[in-house]
């Protein structure tokens, strides 16, 4: 790796006073209720450039003393080992004195490298590549202290480090603002769903009685099926074939594509049926309750119960209704190896539902809320992409920053 004139290329171990790992031996033995011990960071609390201030665990005073080597100081760097390895943040002053569990922590020598610069490089594409790429280019999903110690860091003089970190911090703040707006938008939608889907709040112009309806009465229901994997003629055709992995919390309202497709022969060979556009696919195995509306003709495997609504029901309304009452599907699922909701139990589920015109009006409001979140999400993706491109330039010296004379003194 080449660096500009005036830069150096040390390993992380050469510019840090210490690089170690948090508690790894039976940390749960030290857990105590909140307020009774010392806060401890886990991977869940480390995000790219910031601390996730929730889902904390606490360890006893005795456990903290037994593991005092991993007690953190302000400006230490925390790096995730497992799950999203290489994700890093700086420990803010208010978290000094906390401990950490199964994460790497580095204590930069501030005369050589600033914490924000080391954190930014760790999170950059070049930093992540070093952490993730093993010999032969195979990505590791877990890495150790030795890997981080060997991290090669293109290092400018301190004034330039500080200027680069300041520029990137501006982007971080913009990203945090948009993330906050997304959280607020999602919270508002959740509150709207609670009010509108339970008749706690009625829309102007609607006053008719709501009626109890079972899923069976809402339209045609069906389960999915899977063609034999041994017959090549059944696979890679023109028919979309969904499995629960195709529908996640990030899929959105409509399912437009699937990881696998089948042929008409494959469809006729199994119990799956081709569902028309506008059918509602509901996961009833594994990720129970996740759902999506068919944007194209589609079929599914056995992990779904599918509903093609009749003319009395608006599919978008049912999508939001089932999303809100997902716990009802989970409640009636059973199984020893994995939970699954049977077709009979699925069809028996009952909901209080208004007339179709009110269904449509409610779905329109919730769709508007979704669009607001989607626009903010696109803005967030754009900001992160722009920041990533800038990091590539600044942290490798391909693009240099102008240093004020005052900063060099």
Image (cartoon, rainbow, N blue to C red):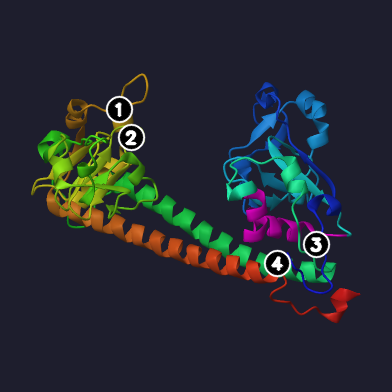
Say which mark, if any, is on residue 9: 3
Crowding at dot 3, Cα within 10 Å, few <14 / some 14-19 / many 20+, comes out as some
* Residue 399 on image: x %, y %: 69, 76
Tell me the crowding category of disc 4: few under 14, some 14 to 19, or many 20 or more residues within 10 angstroms, Cα based.
Answer: many
Q: Which residue is mark 4?
A: 395
Marker disc for residue 228: none
Does 123 appear in magenta?
A: yes
* The quarter of the displayed image where residue 211 is located: top left
Q: Residue furthest left?
A: 311
**SS at mark 4 in the image:** loop
Q: Nearer the viewer, mark 2 or mark 3?
A: 3
Image quadrant containing the N terminus? bottom right
What's the distance in space between the residues labelled 4 and 1, CA to CA? 49 Å
User: Which residue lies under the disc numbered 2?
Assistant: 288
- Between residues 45 and 11, which one lies in front from this camera angle? 11
Q: Which residues are magenta?
A: 112-133
């Amino acid at each position: 790796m080449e660096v500009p004139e005036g830069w150096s290329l040390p390993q992380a171990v050469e510019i840090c006073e210490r690089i170690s790992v948090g508690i790894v031996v039976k940390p749960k033995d030290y857990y105590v209720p909140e307020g009774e011990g010392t806060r401890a960071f886990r991977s869940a609390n480390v995000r790219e450039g910031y601390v996730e201030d929730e889902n904390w665990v606490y360890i006893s005073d005795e456990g903290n003393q037994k593991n005092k080597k991993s007690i953190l100081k302000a400006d230490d760097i925390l790096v995730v080992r497992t799950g999203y390895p290489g994700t890093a943040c700086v420990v803010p002053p208010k978290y000094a004195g906390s401990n950490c569990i199964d994460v790497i922590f580095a204590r930069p020598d501030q005369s050589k490298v600033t914490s924000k610069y080391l954190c930014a490089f760790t999170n950059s594409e070049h930093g992540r590549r070093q952490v993730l790429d093993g010999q032969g280019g195979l990505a590791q999903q877990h890495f150790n202290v030795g890997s981080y110690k060997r991290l090669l860091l293109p290092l400018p003089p301190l004034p330039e480090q500080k200027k680069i970190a300041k520029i990137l911090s501006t982007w971080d703040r913009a990203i945090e603002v948009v993330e906050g707006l997304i959280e607020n938008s999602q919270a508002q939608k959740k509150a709207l769903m609670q009010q509108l889907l339970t008749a706690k709040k009625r829309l102007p112009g609607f006053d008719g009685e709501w009626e109890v309806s079972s899923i069976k009465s809402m339209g045609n229901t069906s389960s999915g099926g899977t063609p034999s994997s041994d017959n090549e003629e059944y696979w890679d055709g023109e028919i979309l074939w969904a499995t629960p992995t195709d529908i996640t919390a990030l899929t959105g309202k409509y399912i437009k594509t699937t990881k696998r497709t089948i042929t008409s022969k494959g469809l006729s060979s199994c119990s799956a049926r081709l569902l028309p556009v506008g059918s509602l696919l509901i996961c009833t195995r594994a990720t129970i309750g996740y759902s999506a509306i068919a944007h194209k003709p589609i079929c599914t495997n056995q992990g779904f119960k599918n509903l093609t609504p009749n003319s009395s029901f608006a599919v978008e309304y049912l999508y939001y209704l089932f999303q809100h009452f997902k716990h009802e599907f989970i409640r009636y699922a059973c199984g020893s190896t994995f939970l699954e909701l049977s077709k009979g139990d699925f069809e028996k589920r009952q909901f209080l539902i208004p007339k179709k015109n009110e269904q449509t009006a409610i779905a329109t409001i919730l769709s508007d809320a979704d669009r607001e979140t989607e626009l903010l999400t696109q803005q967030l993706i754009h900001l992160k992409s722009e920041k990533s491109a800038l990091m590539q330039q600044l942290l490798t010296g391909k693009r240099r920053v102008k240093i004020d004379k005052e900063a060099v003194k």
